[in-house]
């Protein structure tokens, strides 16, 4: 088993709790992230696997990273400002996609879905860039982390 990976993701009480539907989506996003990921803090001389605790402080996302045994490794703070537009646009296009599924042609649905995936990729790339030099991860892990970030924004 690769040790450069996450085995646990916890949302701190600063994230807040929401409706059962949103809590379910958060749980699914965390499950998907843990299921398949590549994650290693840059410069860590020890070994993983790692645990990640996310919290919100002054509209910033705090990544508190520890080893499997609970030993603290590092903390990184990420401004959420660069993600606000992407997440807002992503939710708008998701709404259009779910509406299109009910009534649009397959061609229109496919076009909207391509836009949705494009925005998701943009958010994932932004996340990768913002964490570059702090956390080594592959693009699939960045996508899963961006999904979790979106669910943290989601109001239902």
Image (cartoon, helix red, strand yellow):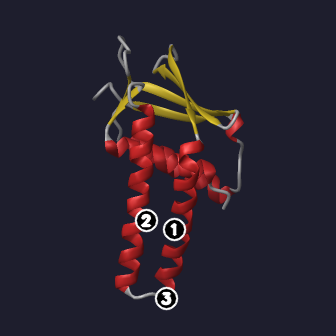
Picture quarter with the N terminus? top left
Of labels 2 and 3, earlier in sequence is: 3
> Whole-percent x and y of residue 72?
52, 15
**Marking on residue 94:** 1
Q: Which residue is mark 2?
A: 116
Q: Residue at x 48, y 33 (%)?
A: 8
Residue 108, quarter of picture: bottom left
Q: Residue at x 63, y 33 (%)?
A: 55
Q: Residue at x 36, y 84 (%)?
A: 106
Q: Residue at x 36, y 12 (%)?
A: 46
Viewer-proximal residue among 40 and 117: 117
How many numbered marks, from 0 up? 3
> Whole-percent x and y of residue 25?
56, 55
Q: Is residue 97 above or below residue 88?
A: below
* Furthest residue toward top: 45
Q: Is residue 50 above or below residue 31?
A: above
**Marking on residue 47:** none
- What's the CA distance linking mark 2 and mark 1? 6 Å
* Furthest residue toward left: 1
- Tell me if 96 is positioned left or right of 109 in this view: right
Q: Secondary structure at mark 2?
A: helix
Of labels 3 and 1, earlier in sequence is: 1
Mark nearer the viewer, 2 or 3: 2
Q: Which residue is mark 3?
A: 103
- Tell me if 87 is positioned left or right of 113 in this view: right
> Whole-percent x and y of residue 137?
35, 34
Viewer-proximal residue among 64 and 19: 64
Q: Secondary structure at mark 1?
A: helix
- What's the CA distance linking mark 3 and mark 1? 15 Å
Q: Is residue 84 above or below residue 137?
A: below
Q: Secondary structure at mark 3?
A: helix
- What's the CA distance linking mark 2 and mark 3? 18 Å
């Amino acid at each position: 088993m690769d040790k450069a990976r996450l085995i646990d993701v916890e949302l701190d009480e600063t994230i807040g709790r929401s409706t059962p539907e949103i809590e379910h989506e958060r749980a699914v996003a965390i499950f998907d992230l843990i299921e398949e990921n590549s994650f290693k803090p840059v410069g860590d001389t020890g070994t993983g696997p790692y645990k990640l605790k996310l919290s919100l402080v002054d509209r910033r996302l705090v990544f508190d990273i520890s080893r499997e045994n609970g030993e603290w490794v590092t903390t990184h703070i990420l401004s959420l400002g660069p993600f606000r537009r992407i997440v807002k646009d992503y939710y708008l296009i998701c709404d259009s996609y779910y509406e299109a599924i009910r009534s649009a042609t397959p061609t229109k649905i496919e076009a909207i879905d391509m836009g949705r995936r494009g925005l998701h990729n943009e958010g994932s790339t932004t996340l990768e860039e913002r964490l570059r030099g702090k956390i080594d991860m592959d693009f699939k892990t960045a996508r899963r982390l961006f999904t979790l970030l979106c669910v943290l924004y989601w109001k239902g």
